[in-house]
Amino acid sequence: MAFLEIRNLTRRFKGKAVLEDLSLSVERGETVAVFGPSGSGKTVLLRLIAGVDRPDGGEIRLDGVDLTEQPPDRRDIGMAFQNFALYPHMSAYANIASPLRAKGASEDEIRAQVREVAALLRIDHVLTHAPRELSNGQKQRTALARALVQRPGVLLLDDPLRNVDAKLRYEMRIELPRVLARFQTTVLYVTQDYREAMALGQRVGVLEGGSFRQIGPPETVYAEPATVDVARLFGDPTIILFRRRIESDGNGAWTEFLGARIPVGAAADAGAACLVGIRPEHVQVAPAPIPDAVAVVLDAVTPLNVRTLLLLKDRDGEEIVATCPEEDAARFPRGHRDVWARIDPSRALVFDDRTGLRLPSGRI
Amino acid sequence: MAGLELDNVTKIYRMRGKEPVLAVDRLDMAVGDGEIVGLLGSSGCGKTSTLRMIAGFEDATAGTIRLGERAIDRLPPARRNIAMAFEGYALYPPLRVRENIGFALLRGRHPRGEVERRVGQVAEMLEITDILDRYPPTISSGQQQRTSLARALIRDADLHLLDEPMSQLEPQLRAILRARIKDWLTGRRMTTVFVTHDQTEAVALADRIAVMEQGVLQQFGTPAELRDRPANLFVAGFIGEPPMNLYPAEIVADGGGPAIAVQSAAGAAAFRVPLPPADAAPALHERLTPGQQVHFGIRPHKVRLGTGDLSGTVLSNRWLGDQSHIGIDIGGCLLTAVTPDPVPGGADGTIAVDLPAAAINLFDAEDGRALFHGLQEAGP
Amino acid sequence: MQHHRQSAIARAIRGVLLTLVGLFFLFPIFWVVLMSFQTNADILRTPPSLFFTPTLDNYVALITGQLDTAVGSLKISYMRNLWNSLVLSSASVALSLLLGIPAAYAFARYRFRLGENIAFTLLSFRFAPPLLVLLPLLLYFQDLGLYDTYIGLVWVYQLITLPLILWIVRGYFEDISPDIEHAYRVDGHGWLATFLKIAVPLARPGIAAAALLAFIFAWNNFVFALILGSSDVQPVTVGALAFITASGIQYGQIAAGLVLSMLPTLVLALLAQRYLVEGLSLGAVKG
């Protein structure tokens, strides 16, 4: 059995299920990113594990012990809240020391441990400050230090980087895994940002509609989403989808997009409606004809982070979104409207239109 | 349609018993006819005060605002001929979405058929066709925001103001709606000023971006200028996802010529980068003297990996679907690199790092002003 | 520039109006203070005049407890009344805080059966006309031996102070982010420690405001003590009745008594001001 084992967890608010039959196993020392759209119940899940909210059904076991009926102060869990939740009337030092005080540790021990975690998170110079005197980044680190200092069995992080600026966010994305490894902590990391989930989780759990739709390594969830909803939650811009029909002939089942024939695995019914999905970075666009490409019209070029977004329309008026590295954007000056686009059929994903499940891809 | 000109515009909030707050400090800005300008900054930087002064909800403490040939700073908001999308949407709850969007046109005595047609057009662009007959309280916040946008974008005003226009949009729609809105504004030559704290949004939508901080305009330029030629340390550290790698450094006279000695956060010597040769950047060599304190910067995606003289330890290496983010420790400096392709090797391995001379940025250590932007031309 | 001049005129008009309103409200207090330094003859003179020879006789009479009137000398116990007021109000507020803060916390943080009903019932005590309950209460008090005791009055005063404290402090508890308390629980502290170390300190400005308000209401109460006690336990509000004597109404002493009775609440309000304006969250939760 896994270190943290959640089985059939259900939580309803006013009769409406926010979490339903949710199950999750996390190994000791593992970091699982819990990713989902806002309102998907990510924070509720953490609160149930922490014990500050009670489930309507299911159980939570930590290292074999059933926690479900335990009060929050007897769970061996640390939690960093999204709004930091520092104690405003205590210094940063007293904030961090709080879990150790609760355990009845000696002042010497408290001082040593607070110093250690504060040094690691680079807040040792502000320990005497009150929370209102700290910058947002320092508040966030203080909250993190408080959650870490007692070396809890499980660390729950509720979107801790949401309220800090971009520079700090990227620094912490690099720093955090090392700090966590140092404490050998098992971590559930909640985020609304798919990139953060992929950057920090050894596995990513996609929470949607009250339970996990898919749990797996980040690359797998991104490249092989279980459902069309999971596929749509990843990517910026997200995957583009087109309604098509499954065709069938002597060579097996297939469907079509942008002039390319996309084989579909044997299970597909001929004539059934399907959704063809392709990620914008997998649409290759060229200013001049290239082999296997289809002529399309370029409507707009907008920069997007380190990539550039190209808004295209094909002959049937269907809107296609593509991206290219920002260096390539110079190939599409303003007013250049006639371009060519192609896809690699092996990159295309096909989903059942009715169930949303991904259909196995066929052989090319 | 017309250009907008802010001349020496200043806003000071005075409250009894408190220090006066200088929200906007002598702002000069000219927005061309048909141009899209984004005011970008963190909360409290003065961007919203500026927008409210242009709209007429706040008086400017000093300075003038001209729209086309007219000075508008003393006109009441209704007479400025400005369309605005509010951050809080400000939809009329008793009216259907359709009536909300067409409200100003109907009041302006446009024929009903034309209003219907135009409402349909903007609704299709913003994907709200299916909720046109609903009432605002019954639709999601993302849909409310799109309705509020539609209400502003449908009007033929001299100026369109958008306050955080896409903060609540559904993430899946955001990228494509930005492209469509830009297409809409450009195609109709609508002069537009929008406020945002989200640089991705600013970069995607704006022709030019005004970066503000503490009431002061830091830089006003195209997204490419901000990215490749940041005017000062603040802009350099603010723009980019992830933002520029920045470290304190000192100019030293090396054996082979002047070099940049980069220091770690702890103040120790971390690594050296040779200055571009004197014949390639003569002006730079004139400006720099050995012993001079500077800041050294390089954008994460200009860092080349697997080649070069520097060597670092990989702290993290993650493929994010369409780009890799790699954290590297070089002599105590944390360096972020972004590459379009996956990079082999996991954490704790060593990796060769090249910081191309063409991508080097230098800033004055004292006032933060940019000294050098590498050898590149400003991109598109 | 028209824009600006208009707003300057508006500012001026606003200033004048505020001054007028201020004068209107402060005038009675001003007049009472003046009266307290006048003899009855000065006060009753028509037309009234701002010019008189100030006298401290009224205050002397109150403090020495010796009231000299035209008909003769009368013993009064105004200082005793003042002391009673202090004892009754302080004790009532203290008891209400002891009972009300935990109750307010319970109402703010926990949802339980009939919770809202109980809270509203407590508030409704404030709506009931006191006279309605006074007569039966008098009979019970006499039976129980609570008539004319501090304990009895403090108990009845709970009708005034408890609902006030409960409802004001409840609002302050509700304003504290529950996450702060949850964080403390997750740290490993029990619920009692969380209540005492987190909730109560953070609600302190609210508690101070509620206590002050309750104190003032208790101080100003008249009818409970009039019926349920003798002069041994009666507060200043009732004590002032003693100045309506057979030989006439002693306006000077009444005014001086009023001034003295205003002082404690005034001092308290000034002292508590710091707590009243102190921010609630102090920036611990992202702002």
Image (cartoon, helix red, strand yellow):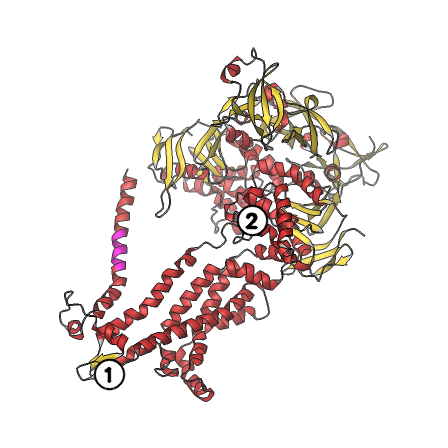
Question: Subunit of mark 2?
Answer: A
Identify the residue shown where x is 65% and y is 61%.
Answer: A15
On the rendered image, what quadrant is the C terminus of chain A found in?
A: top right
Q: Is residue B167 covered in magenta?
A: no
Residue toward you, A309 or B266: B266
In the displayed structure image, the side of residue B291 where residue A59 appears, left or right: right
Residue span colored magenta: C15-22
Across the whole image, how many numbered discs are drawn on residues? 2
Task: Please provide percent x and percent y for residue A230.
Answer: 70, 43
> Residue A92's mark?
2
Tag 2: residue type?
Ala
In the displayed structure image, the side of residue A172 where residue C117 appears, left or right: left
> Residue C74's mark?
1
Residue toward you, C21 or B261: B261
Mark yes or no: residue C241 visible: yes
Q: Main secondary structure of the magenta part?
A: helix
